[in-house]
Amino acid sequence: MTGNPTRSVGRRIDRLSHLRQRTRRLIVVATLVGLPAAYLWSSYWLTTSTPTILWGPVTFLLFGATLVGAFLLYGFVRRRADLPGVGLDERERQLRDRAWILAYQVLSAVVVGAIVVAGLQVFVFGNEITLDADAVNGLVLSVAVLLPLLPGAALAWIEPDAIEEA
Amino acid sequence: MARPNERVEPILHNRLAVLRAERGLSRQELADALGVNYQTIGYLERGEYNPSLELALRTAEHFGLPVEAIFSRRPFAPMSAQLYGSAPEAKAG
């Protein structure tokens, strides 16, 4: 006997909605860092003599971090970070708005940071920045995957620990 | 500038937990009656969320009390002090 599978899935989803803030923050970091790190690791691997057998597991682990993290974040946030937020009460809407602001601030910081680093590389250190097809591919895919995750990740980051029902 | 996860508004004290216990309501039951998530009731009780004027009025209406009997900018006096005119620690001493 394995029990009712629907109830078991329901219990697992309920457990996700009660994740501690510290755990959620670790998941957010793993999710957002995993995919870009996988591309960086691949680029690094191409330029070194690191054994091929290492490339697969490490890449799989980093991609997996984003994939599993995204699944867990969705399980926690569900549709609470969406607009217009049908079914949310005033506190949840306020939290959602704060999450969007944080997501915007993080995105702005990343864009400005990237521009500053690129500017320093080119104008101060005199290095050239070449964007080959692989780099553009990695960049576009990372942005396409991570950008929609940002508001949910921000919500998971800021939401305080759940209060037990009583 | 305040960070998005920083609390900016002052704490609003409330008697929700006492009133809820007095009426024998669970957080879920009160939440259903007020049309909010039960977590919101928990955050209100812990003073971690200040209700909108509309929610405060709805809460007052639900309990049949004036809004200032439930929410206050200053801490509420203990029930014993209000009923008997002295705080419990005064009696203990």
Image (cartoon, grey):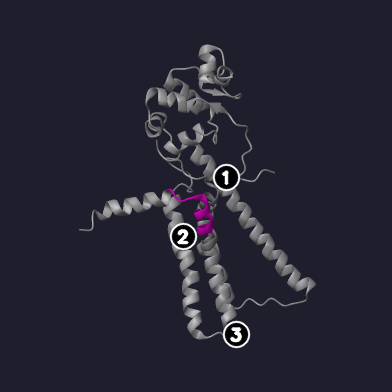
Q: Which mark is residue A48?
A: 3
Total number of numbered labels?
Answer: 3
Whole-percent x, y for residue A84 in the image: 48, 44
- Mark seen at residue B41: none
Tell me which label, 3 or 2, sits earlier in the chain: 3
Name the residue nearer the viewer: B54 or B46. Answer: B46
Disc 1 and disc 3 on one polypeptide chain: yes
Residue A145 drawn in magenta: no
The residue most toward the front is B93
Q: Residue furthest top?
A: B84
Indicate the amino acid at tag 3.
Answer: Thr
The quadrant of the image that shows the C terminus of chain A is top left
Location of mark 1 (residue): A98
Q: Helix, strand, or loop for circle 2? A: helix
Q: Quadrant of the N terminus of chain A?
A: bottom left
CB-based contact (under 8 Å), mark 1 and mark 3: no
Q: Nearer the viewer, residue A118 or B67?
A: B67
Quarter residue A75 falls in: bottom left
Give the class, few, some or many, for how many residues have Cα within 10 Å of label 1's Cα (few <14, many ≥20).
many
Magenta region? A18-28
Disc with the residue nearer the chain's start (1 vs 3):
3
Which residue is labeled 2 in the image? A70
Where disc 1 sits, the SS reads: helix
Label 3 neighbour load within 10 Å: few <14, some 14-19, many 20+: few
| Residue B50 pos. (x, y %) | 55, 32
